[in-house]
Image (cartoon, helix red, strand yellow):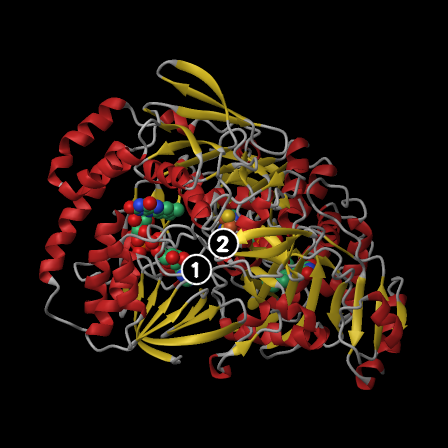
């Protein structure tokens, strides 16, 4: 039905449907999004840009909200989970 | 109802908190009167850099004295004492030429300080822009989280039987203060109300100097020292609105970016034009700041005396009324020394450093 | 793209879309700003697999294709000076000047702390719906939906459509309140239809009243939940828990602009007059930001605000009558789904309240006032700027202030350094 694109999450290629968010790609890769101050694993919570739990590094730029950005082919995503 | 105390401290900013701590440690019966939350005045708006600024000799003396006393406070839990050192940097040959004098002044005051050349500067802080001329490293200086430090000092005083009273002081008498809840407390009264000083002591002039700060997301290991431009001292002692590059790595990995000085402003709203000036100034020296994310910005009002030195001591023409206020942009640094000086005078002891430059008498004259 | 718009609309949900459209039809040059990449707001959020309802598509198309409307996606408002807003997108920043401003910033979900709510696998209810629409993997996943309000059904239906096995929906409101509510529904026939469609989509999914998820468990991810209901306690193994307790208006921008707010239960909303005008001249507000009212009131209020912002005198009165009816429905909803004391008591002393700074509820207890607590614990000092924890604390009956200073959202330092005279500043980042 829809086309897929490939993004790299922590070095692993992940396929997502075109138009999907970076958050969806991270979830598909099975990765946590970040570690909290006290070391807890965390993942996306609000899905709408409010909670900042989904922060990841995208193409070398840290602290980006994965739920607010559409995944692009070849994007390099790093989580610290 | 009336109660009597050896010392009633009005105001629980970092200054009042430090005074209550020292007085209670001396065995005095202390009351602390605070109308808001502890450390929530300008103490919560400051950078918390513990630094010896060498502009005025008496300011330097008080800072150096205090830095020694801070060593006993560094383990207070949550106070985030972090010995990152201060790295003063010079933009050009002109600023570099001022370094020998600066070193001499700092060393004469007992500080460990060393000159660094351009290459060493880059090595110490790779994020600094290339082409800076050199600087001075003061390795022992530190940063703290002031509102929690203030709270810990008050808690410590309370464990020594000091009484914390949530009320506003509204009038002074001879060895007495009246609170807005109707209480009247008897004893020596110390006014440590910062920028609100003139509400109780109209004879001691206080100017407010507004300053902006901004904090970033966490970027661990981007900076290692508190970075201060050599021009900061001019900004601190100038008479017109100014900005200076002053950037601090917090123990959390966040960066605290400062700072500005504005005169004749008494609100602490964010001024976007001033924030812009401050940031552009910082970008000149730290270009990689541009891309970082700011979480918050705020402004605070530094309480400044008539001559840049705090008022510490007995208030002339009043009986049993003392003051410790007007520390401008250095009150966190100089709080422990201020407290020691004040309590020594109260107990009629000879202070460890000359107390005369801070005598409030000079303002009343 | 223009530097100045006659009408600048913030938010492209139903309210913002109709506001932009009404203003443009009345001849204004309109800028439509949204932090999201695609229009639609919450209810019409773009779905990567399913197309939006025909009405929503028409509404979005009519607005986006209108020659007088500039669509500014992925653009967040972070600062303001009189007559202009500082905005940032992933690559650049600029100042946008306006003649009139319409705030259609919508609402966020109220997420309340309970033991285990920070585990990966626990999301908001609307949160899971939003994530699913963005391509979050749900096929074959065991999903439980819980919390309160009509959003639970919508979230469950979306999850199911995306292949999830929805095990159950747990609503905290009790059956009696729900019955009273449904008996009154005949006054809003469109709502009866909506509810019937949702129920049909959820055929076979048990819907329990008076039931609360009391804990989520797992190591580094959710494995199991505990539910307490009229028939006692039970445990359910699941992969995702979607739990939300209704909505809270996004009033931060309005607050920064100086607009008067008023109470909406434990939360705040923007106060507007019959023409959607706020207390600040030239600033209008519409939709959820003026109180949770749902899609229909958002559509109507957007149209009123769009017209009023262009100075129109006609066409408003009939809309105002329709708004009254839509708002009456919202009041019913609020009463039915009022949050139970049991829910407020879920968080334990060691439950995190501030997820950004990892602050527990117990740590806040040591403080008498909110400001002291914040300074001492860092609660609310993280990147969400209190949007999650302060909203929750307000619901738990602990006062918490609204953050309303620039930057309104975390923003690049260079954005904040941009002067109105600088034009557009492109970032080096991307
Ligand atoms: C932007 C900025 C950066 C700074 N950076 C630094 C730095 O890096 N290093 C440094 O050393 N210093 C710094 N400072 C300066 C430092 O913050 C102040 O000098 C210091 O906090 C002053 O403390 P205080 O106790 O006198 O005042 P405050 O903290 O304001 O305390 C006064 C207290 O008195 C209370 N009060 C007032 N009136 C009454 C009354 N009538 N009754 C009862 N209570 C009352 C108030 O509620 C308040 O809590 C900075 C300041 C600013 C604004
Ligand atoms: C997560 C969630 C899911 C929902 N699902 C449904 C549902 O399925 N069915 C239903 O009937 N209702 C649903 N609702 C209720 C929904 O709020 C309303 O039905 C409707 O979307 C309200 O329209 P609105 O235009 O007022 O606001 P919204 O649709 O919320 O739109 C507001 C827009 O403003 C933008 N915005 C906010 N602040 C800024 C800023 N500073 N800068 C730039 N842009 C900004 C946001 O990105 C958002 O796109 C949901 C609500 C939420 C929070
Ligand atoms: S999931 Fe909340 S901000 Fe992205």
Tell me if C188 is positioned left or right of A64 in this view: left
Badge 1: few (under 14), some or many (20 or more) residues near its Cα, within 10 Å?
many
Quarter of the image containing the N terminus of chain C? bottom left
- In which quarter of the view is residue C38 placed? bottom left
Label 1: which secondary element: loop
Tell me if B219 is positioned left or right of C77 in this view: right
Question: Which residue is farthest top?
Answer: C231
Q: State whether residue C406 appears in this view.
A: yes
Q: State whether residue B182 appears in this view.
A: no
Residue at mark 2: chain: A
Whether residue C297 is situated above or below residue B2 in the rendered picture: below
For marks 1 and 2, give the CA distance.
13 Å
Of C255 and C184, the residue lying toward us:
C184
x and y percent of residue A60 in the render?
67, 62
Q: For the residues carrying marks 1 and 2, which lies nearer the camera in this image?
A: 2
Identify the residue at image location x=37%, y=64%.
C257
x and y percent of residue C125 in the render?
41, 39
x and y percent of residue A14 in the render?
61, 51
Question: Which residue is farthest front?
Answer: A1
Indicate if the residue with disc 1 has its beta carbon within 8 Å of ligand 2: yes
Question: Which residue is farthest bottom?
Answer: B94
């Amino acid at each position: 039905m829809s086309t897929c694109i490939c993004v790299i999450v922590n070095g692993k290629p992940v396929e997502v449907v075109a138009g999907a968010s970076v958050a969806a790609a991270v979830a598909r890769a099975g990765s946590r999004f970040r570690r909290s101050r006290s070391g807890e694993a965390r993942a996306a919570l609000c899905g709408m840009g409010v909670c900042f739990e989904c922060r990841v590094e995208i193409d070398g730029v840290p602290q980006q909200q994965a739920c607010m950005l559409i995944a692009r082919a070849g994007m390099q995503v790093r989580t610290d989970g | 109802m009336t109660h009597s105390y050896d010392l009633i401290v009005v105001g629980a900013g970092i200054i009042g908190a430090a005074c209550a701590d020292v007085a209670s440690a001396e065995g005095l019966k202390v009351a602390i009167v605070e109308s808001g939350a502890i450390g929530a005045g300008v103490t919560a708006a400051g950078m918390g850099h513990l630094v010896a600024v060498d502009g005025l000799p008496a300011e330097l003396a008080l800072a150096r004295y205090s830095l020694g006393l801070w060593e006993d406070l560094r383990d207070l839990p949550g106070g985030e004492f972090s010995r990152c050192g201060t790295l003063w940097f010079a933009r050009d040959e002109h600023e570099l030429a001022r370094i020998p004098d600066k070193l001499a002044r700092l060393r004469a005051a007992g500080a460990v300080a060393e000159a660094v050349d351009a290459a060493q500067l880059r090595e110490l802080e790779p994020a600094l822009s290339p082409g800076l001329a050199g600087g001075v490293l003061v390795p022992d200086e530190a940063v703290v989280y002031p509102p929690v430090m203030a709270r810990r000092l008050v808690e410590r005083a309370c464990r020594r039987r000091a009484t914390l009273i949530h009320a506003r002081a509204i009038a002074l008498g001879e060895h007495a203060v009246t609170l807005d809840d109707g209480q009247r407390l008897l004893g020596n009264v110390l006014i440590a109300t910062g920028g609100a000083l003139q509400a109780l002591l109209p004879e001691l002039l206080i100017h407010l100097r507004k300053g902006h700060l901004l904090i970033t997301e966490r970027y661990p290991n981007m900076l290692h020292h508190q970075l201060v431009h050599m021009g900061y001292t001019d900004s601190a002692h100038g008479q017109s609105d100014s900005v200076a590059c002053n950037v601090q790595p917090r123990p959390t990995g966040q960066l605290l970016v400062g700072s500005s000085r504005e005169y004749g402003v008494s609100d602490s709203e964010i001024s976007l034009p001033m924030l812009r000036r401050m940031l552009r100034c910082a970008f000149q020296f730290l270009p990689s700041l541009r891309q970082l994310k700011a979480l918050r910005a705020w402004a605070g009002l530094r309480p400044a005396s008539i001559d840049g030195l705090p008022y510490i001591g007995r208030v002339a023409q009043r009986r049993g009324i003392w003051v410790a206020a007007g520390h401008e942009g250095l009150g966190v640094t100089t709080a422990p020394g201020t407290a020691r000086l004040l309590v020594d005078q109260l107990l009629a002891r000879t202070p460890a450093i000359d107390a005369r430059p801070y005598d409030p008498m000079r303002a009343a004259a | 793209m223009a530097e100045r718009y006659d009408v600048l609309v913030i938010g492209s949900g139903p309210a913002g879309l109709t506001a932009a459209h009404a203003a443009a039809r009345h001849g204004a040059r309109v800028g439509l700003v949204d932090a999201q990449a695609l229009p639609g707001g919450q209810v019409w959020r773009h779905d990567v697999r399913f197309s939006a309802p025909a009405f929503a598509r028409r509404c979005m198309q009519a607005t986006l294709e209108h020659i007088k409307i500039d669509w500014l996606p992925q653009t967040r408002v972070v600062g303001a000076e009189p007559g202009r807003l500082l905005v940032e997108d992933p690559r650049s920043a600029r100042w946008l000047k306006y003649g009139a401003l319409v705030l259609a910033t919508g609402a966020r979900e109220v997420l309340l702390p309970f033991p285990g709510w920070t585990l990966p696998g626990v999301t908001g209810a609307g949160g899971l719906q939003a994530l699913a629409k963005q391509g979050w993997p749900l096929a074959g996943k065991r999903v439980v939906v819980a919390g309160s309000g009509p959003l639970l059904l919508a979230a469950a239906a979306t999850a199911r459509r995306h292949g999830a096995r929805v095990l159950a929906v747990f609503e905290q409101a009790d059956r009696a309140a729900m019955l009273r509510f449904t008996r009154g529904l005949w006054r809003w026939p469109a709502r009866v239809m909506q509810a019937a469609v949702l129920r049909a989509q959820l055929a076979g999914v048990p819907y329990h009243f008076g039931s609360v998820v009391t804990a989520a468990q797992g190591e580094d991810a959710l494995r199991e939940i505990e539910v307490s209901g009229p028939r006692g306690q039970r445990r359910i193994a699941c992969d995702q828990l979607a739990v939300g307790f209704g909505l809270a208006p996004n009033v931060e921008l309005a607050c920064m602009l100086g607009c008067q707010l008023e109470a909406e239960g434990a939360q705040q909303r923007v106060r507007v007059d019959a023409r959607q005008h706020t207390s600040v001249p030239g600033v209008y507000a519409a939709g959820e930001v003026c109180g949770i009212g749902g899609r229909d009131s958002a559509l109507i209020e957007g149209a009123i605000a769009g017209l009023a912002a262009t100075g129109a005198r006609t066409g408003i009165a009939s809309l105002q009558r329709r708004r009254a009816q839509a708002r009456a429905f919202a009041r019913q909803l609020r009463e039915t789904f009022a949050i139970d004391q049991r829910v407020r008591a879920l968080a334990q002393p060691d439950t995190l309240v501030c997820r950004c700074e990892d602050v527990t509820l117990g740590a806040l207890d040591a403080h008498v006032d909110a400001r002291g607590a914040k300074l001492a614990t860092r609660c609310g000092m993280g990147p969400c700027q209190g949007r999650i924890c302060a909203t929750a604390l307000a619901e738990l009956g602990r006062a918490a202030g609204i953050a309303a200073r620039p930057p309104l959202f975390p923003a690049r330092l260079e954005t904040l350094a941009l002067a109105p005279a600088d034009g557009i500043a492109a970032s080096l980042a991307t």
